[in-house]
């Protein structure tokens, strides 16, 4: 059962992409998934989505455009990405 994908950028930093179904049912189980996403967005751990959506359309090889939550690697180290340059 796939929950999502991961991808490294040119510097070797990983980003994680979670399917909306897995986000709600597994990652945020027992919590309000939209509130979790909003809190992560405020801390810079979640890439902003399209418009009012917190998930983004991402092109995935073999699947085409898929809506996913894009999580920055800073989340795993609990580093606040909005203050990382301080």
Image: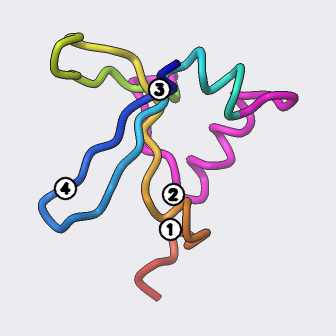
* Horizontal relation, residue 45 to residue 13: left or right: right
Residue that sits furthest to the left in the current view: 10
For the point 38% across and 26% down, which residue is it? 56
For the point 56% across and 47% down, which residue is it? 41
Judged by depth in the image, the label closer to the viewer, 2 or 4, is: 4
Q: Is residue 16 above or below residue 75?
A: above
First in residue order: circle 4 vs circle 3 = 4
* Horizontal relation, residue 79 to residue 34: left or right: left
Q: Residues within 10 Å of mark 2 (few under 14, many from 20)?
A: many
Q: Is residue 74 above or below residue 24?
A: below
Q: Which residues are magenta?
A: 28-53
Q: Is residue 35 magenta?
A: yes
Residue that sits furthest to the bottom in the current view: 86
Q: What percent of the width, then of the height, locates residue 78?
A: 61, 69
Secondary structure beneath label 2: loop
* Horizontal relation, residue 61 to residue 28: left or right: left
Q: Are marks 1 and 3 in contact (CB under 8 Å)?
A: no
Which labelled disc corresponds to residue 18?
A: none
Q: Which residue is mark 3?
A: 55
Q: Measure the C-alpha gap from mark 3 to mark 2.
A: 14 Å
For the point 41% across and 83% down, which residue is it? 85
Q: Are marks 2 and 1 in contact (CB under 8 Å)?
A: yes
Q: Are marks 4 and 1 in contact (CB under 8 Å)?
A: no
Q: Measure the C-alpha gap from mark 2 to mark 1.
A: 5 Å
Q: What percent of the width, then of the height, locates residue 25?
A: 71, 20
* Horizontal relation, residue 35 to residue 46: left or right: right
Which labelled disc corresponds to residue 9?
A: 4
């Amino acid at each position: 059962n796939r929950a999502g994908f991961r991808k490294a950028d040119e510097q070797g930093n990983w980003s994680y992409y979670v399917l909306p179904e897995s986000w709600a049912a597994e990652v945020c189980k027992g919590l309000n998934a939209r509130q979790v996403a909003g809190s992560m967005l405020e801390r810079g751990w979640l890439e902003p989505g399209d418009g009012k959506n917190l998930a983004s359309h991402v092109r995935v090889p073999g699947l085409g455009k898929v809506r996913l939550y894009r999580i920055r690697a800073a989340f795993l180290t609990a580093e606040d990405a909005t203050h990382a340059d301080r």
